[in-house]
Amino acid sequence: MSEKITLSKEKLRQLQLVELEMIVEVDRICRKYKIKYSLDGGTLLGAVRHHGFIPWDDDADVIFTRHEYVKFYKACKKELDQERFFLQDYTTDPYYRWGYAKLRRKNTEFIRYGQEKMRYRTGICIDIFVVDNVPDNKVLREMYYGMNFFIRKVMYSELGRTAADHVFLRGIYEILYKIPRDPMFRLRNCLAAKCNKKKTKLVSHLLYQYPRKECKYGMPAECFESYIEVEFEGMPLKIFADYDRYLTLLYHHYMELPPVEKRHGPGEASCVELIDITLEEIQQRYQNENKKLDAEK
């Protein structure tokens, strides 16, 4: 097993800046093609509570509806800066198994401790979540949740067969790992396409479960209807207009700071390679790109 790496405050901030560079790239593409997105999870919380990253957070998230992500995916084929970034999902990386996409920064490295044997492309990344509709009918909702739960476990099996705490669970994951990846993604896509044919009260990225029971089955679809701009690290980025409802479901009393002993990132790394970039450089690039967009209008 590799040695655990705990980032210093300076290294953590440098990691955040690389992630910020990727968020700004997402924002640039979305502004150019009028695509709706929002910061998500701890990044959304950071935008509202800190006007930037949560000081101890080491990852970043954005989120789309399925309709908007399809537009973003297509735009990236011709617009994404391929020299700096790589859009990773199961269609662009044959070894990628997670049910959400990632935008990775080339010429960097960040491998979570315990994930050294995963075969997909690595590098510093931000998570890109996509929500699909969830059935309103309670029975169908339970079935939909259960099928996605099974798919999620199959996808996790490559890691779970070595990382699960108990030998019995490792054995279960070893069996699940024998199920091919691509049919599971096709099943997920078919389920989502069927549910997306009509509006529903809830939406969810069911291959990455929401953490609290209040949002077990998803978030109100209404939260994804309207967006506003807020300051994030000195730049206006997009979030849900109804962020209070979303963050309350996600974190409950979200404006309260956690105890000092809980102010840490999700986990350690086993390999980290950063690049030098400053907040001023990112802000200047943001300004230049938006001036260019304004001139093209």
Image (cartoon, helix red, strand yellow):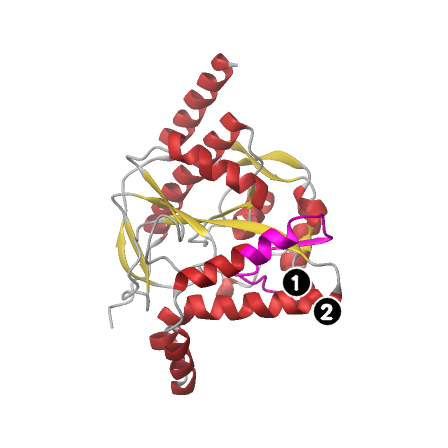
Instruction: Estimate how packed mark 1 is, as few (under 14), some (14 to 19) or many (20 or more) residues with alpha carbons within 10 Å.
Output: many
Image coordinates of residue 155 in percent, x first then y, are: 43, 66
Image coordinates of residue 261 in percent, x first then y, are: 49, 66
Identify whether 3 is placed above or below 110. below
Q: Is residue 139 visible from the viewing direction of this image? A: yes
Relative to the observer, which residue lies in front, 25 or 87? Answer: 87
Q: Which residue is mark 1?
A: 217
Instruction: Magenta stretch: give its range.
Output: 190-212
Q: Which residue is mark 2?
A: 139
The number of numbered discs placed on residues in the rendered structure image is 2
Q: Are marks 2 and 1 in contact (CB under 8 Å)?
A: no
Q: Is residue 255 visible from the viewing direction of this image? A: no
Residue at point 63%, 54% (across, down): 194
User: Split into 4 quadrants, where in the image is the N terminus?
Assistant: bottom left
Q: Amino acid at mark 2?
A: Val
Residue 274 relative to residue 243: left or right: left
Residue 66 relative to residue 29: left or right: right
Residue at point 36%, 69% (across, down): 158
Instruction: Estimate how packed mark 2 is, as few (under 14), some (14 to 19) or many (20 or more) residues with alpha carbons within 10 Å.
Output: few
Q: Secondary structure at mark 2?
A: helix
Q: Main secondary structure of the magenta part?
A: loop
Quadrant of the rendered structure where residue 135 is?
bottom right
